[in-house]
Image: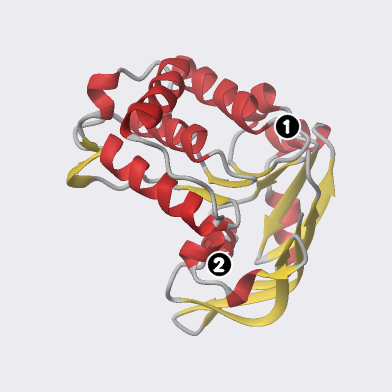
Amino acid sequence: MLKIDNLHATVDDKPILKGISLAINAGEIHAVMGPNGSGKSTLSYVLAGRPGYAVTEGSVTLDGEDLLELDPHERAAKGMFLGFQYPVEIPGVSNVQFLRTALNAQRRARGEAELSAGEFLRVAREQADALDLSMDMMKRGVNVGFSGGEKKRNEMVQMGIIDPRLAILDETDSGLDIDALRVVGQGINRIMRKPDKAVLLITHYERLLEIVEPDFVHVLAGGRIVRSGGPELAHELEREGYGAMAEAAA
């Protein structure tokens, strides 16, 4: 599904990604771990097409199509979803309004019929109930007045409604308490643990991986993937930290 080959990228002319290669097949969940400043969020932003992140070398394809040639909204229409580490607030725009507009824009791009207001509300209610988010909150401004945990659950509701093929989740577990972590982890499994979907899950902590249980774990340090393995690699990192791997990448 997603193939990254020798990807180099800069931010403000500073090299951040220094040759990342990674292949994610449909049905797989890949976790990326690593110390602060290693390039994890930069990788997610480059894949999503955020302005200011310049690719200087390498390629990225989604289902064989050159992802880097697509605008961000075109990448979304192809089935990509980005979950932010720090979800932004959008005052004056309700969750319901925002999500119905986004979903129908994607459906139009794929040549599918738009959902009516009633059809959309049924979908939204189903996803909100599954993430313990009330419909009253869905009618509020996007993330306005939400706690950290509510913002992350709201993103999972967004993901459930958009129903992407590829989810890139940037530290979705950041700032979550134990209960919220369980709800969010179970949401990822419910929405994305399917044969035709894939996840790139960026995290610092093993605790989310105990719920989501990735197929592969990769360690990113110094802008490169310095080690890959199965779920047991996350346990090793929890015990020993990133020290030796970060030194090897220096």
Choose between 65 and 110: the one closer to the eye: 110
Place residue 208 in its image quadrant: top right
What element does badge 1 sit on? loop
Mark number, residue 85? none
- What residue does disc 1 label? 194
Is 46 situated above or below 183?
below
On-image quarter of the N terminus: bottom right
Three-letter code, disc 2: Val
Q: Secondary structure at mark 2?
A: helix
Residue 46 marker: 2
Amino acid of disc 1: Lys
Q: Nearer the viewer, residue 27 or 225?
A: 27
- Does 79 sit above or below residue 198? below
Residue at the image position 34 percent from the left and 27 percent from the top: 118
Query: Is residue 41 at all visible to an observer of this figure?
Result: no
- At x 47%, y 54%, the residue is 108
Q: Nearer the viewer, residue 136 or 100?
A: 100
In front: label 2 or label 1: 1
Q: Residue furthest right?
A: 229
